[in-house]
Structures are given as structure tokens and as C-alpha cells.
Amino acid sequence: MVRIMVVEDDPNIASLLHGHIKKYGFHVTLVEDFDHIIDFFKEEEPDLVLLDINLPSYDGFYWCRQIRAISTCPILFISARSGKMDQVMALENGGDDFITKPFDYDVVLAKIRSSLRRAYGEYAPKTEERTVQLDGLVLYLERMELHKNTEVVSLTKKETILLELLMKRSPRVATREAILEKLWDDQSFVDENTLNVNVTRIRKKLLELGIEHAIETVRGAGYRLIPNWEKLS
């Protein structure tokens, strides 16, 4: 069943959306704790999000960016703010569509169905899943998972980016500058310890797959991922 997550702090509107959408066979969940929206998103794993702009604590633009950091699911903004700049900001911050209040609930439903078709159905782009492979290791970029035979470990977004760079450069050195450029927009505020912490996390994830000593620190240059895991372990 398709899961719809509604982020709307007006209880009347939220209840009406819940009732109308549910009638058409969708599973609908309403956010009630507006300080922990991203935690609720991770728990529910919805296929689509209806997101208001005016919310307690942080606005919908902020939460849209947080969702986009971990998911590409469709996000439809629903708001009484009808200005051109609000609509531009909604799209620029990762939204897929903008619905102005007061809205017709049948229009909302039509836009939900349209977005689901584009994302998952007949209009979805037919692309192969991106992977990086090295000596029996397979990194699934969209899933943020690292596979070795039947073993699997989950990764964070930054761990996935860092490991992708190391695997693509292997056995060459991935320079500190190249890593910082990939992981952070502003390198000037990143200290050496922050980078070391991220490399340590990757080492721990490899260790979960039985791989030790695969990442070599090249003093004054960066890091190198050495293949031939069986010889290293």
C-alpha cells in the first residue's frame, strides 16, 4: 500500500486530508511532533510527503532539505502562502510541486497520483541502479549499502560519498583536498579531526565485513583503499 505522510499543523486541514486521501486506498500518517519530523520520516518511510511551509520551530523549506538529504521521494508543498517567491523557494529547496490553500481535495489527490506515477510508475525514468565495484565489494549508491558476498552494512550519506571516492581512486591516493571537496561545501571550517572521524567510521564498516587494514593513511597526502581483502585480513 502506498504510504502518504502529511506534515500539517492545522488539525482540521490535517484531518480532512487524512480522511479524503485514505478513502482512495492510501495509507496516511499525520505528523504530530513537529520538532522531530525527520525521525518520523525515517520511521514511516513514506512514498510521498505533503508538506506545509508554516510550521512550528522550523519551516517546511528546512524540513524539505532534511528529507532530500536521505530520500528522493516526491514532496508536495501545501501552503496558504501563494507568492511567486514562496513557490520558487519550494522548488529550489527540493519540492516537486506546490498546492495553494484553500485547495480542492480532488486536485490534491490528482497531484498525488501524478507525482507517484512520475516517481514510481509508468512515467518513472528507467535507469539502472548505480553501483561501484572493487574486488568483491559492491557499493549501492542509492541504497547507501555496502555488500560483500551475502553480507551487508548500511552507510550514512557521507560514508557513502567517501567510500565511493576511495573505491573509484583505488589503489591511487584520494587526496585530503579531494575528499573535503566531495564531503563539504565549505572546506575552511572543517578541521583534520572531522575528516579522521569519517575515515574511522568507514574502517569500522569495513571491519563489519571482515576487512581489516584496507584504508591506508598516506601522511601529508590523504588516504588510499587497498584491494585484495583476503590478503589484508
Image (cartoon, rainbow, N blue to C red):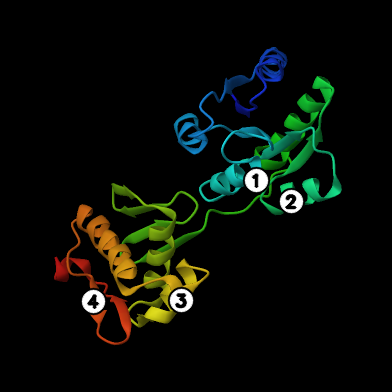
Q: Mark 2 to mark 3: distance in Å?
A: 27 Å
Q: Residue at x 25, y 59 (%)?
A: 206
Q: In the rendering, at what x and y percent does residue 14 appear?
A: 67, 20
Q: Are marks 2 and 1 in contact (CB under 8 Å)?
A: yes
Q: Which residue is mark 2?
A: 89
Going from the N terminus, do you reach mark 2 or mark 3 first?
A: 2
Q: CA distance from mark 4 to mark 3?
A: 24 Å
Distance from label 1 to label 4 (Cα)? 40 Å
Q: Name the mark on residue 216.
A: 4
Q: Gap in Å between the C-alphas at discs 2 and 1? A: 7 Å
Quadrant of residue 108 within the rendered picture = top right
Q: x, y percentage for residue 44?
A: 49, 29
In the image, what residue type sits under mark 2?
Met
Task: Please name which of the two marks, 4 or 3, marks the residue nearer to the observer.
Answer: 3
Q: Earlier in the sequence, mark 2 or mark 4?
A: 2
SS for callout 1: helix
Mark 2 vs mark 4, foreground winner is 2
Amino acid residing under circle 3: Ser
What's the residue at 65%, 45% (across, down)? 61
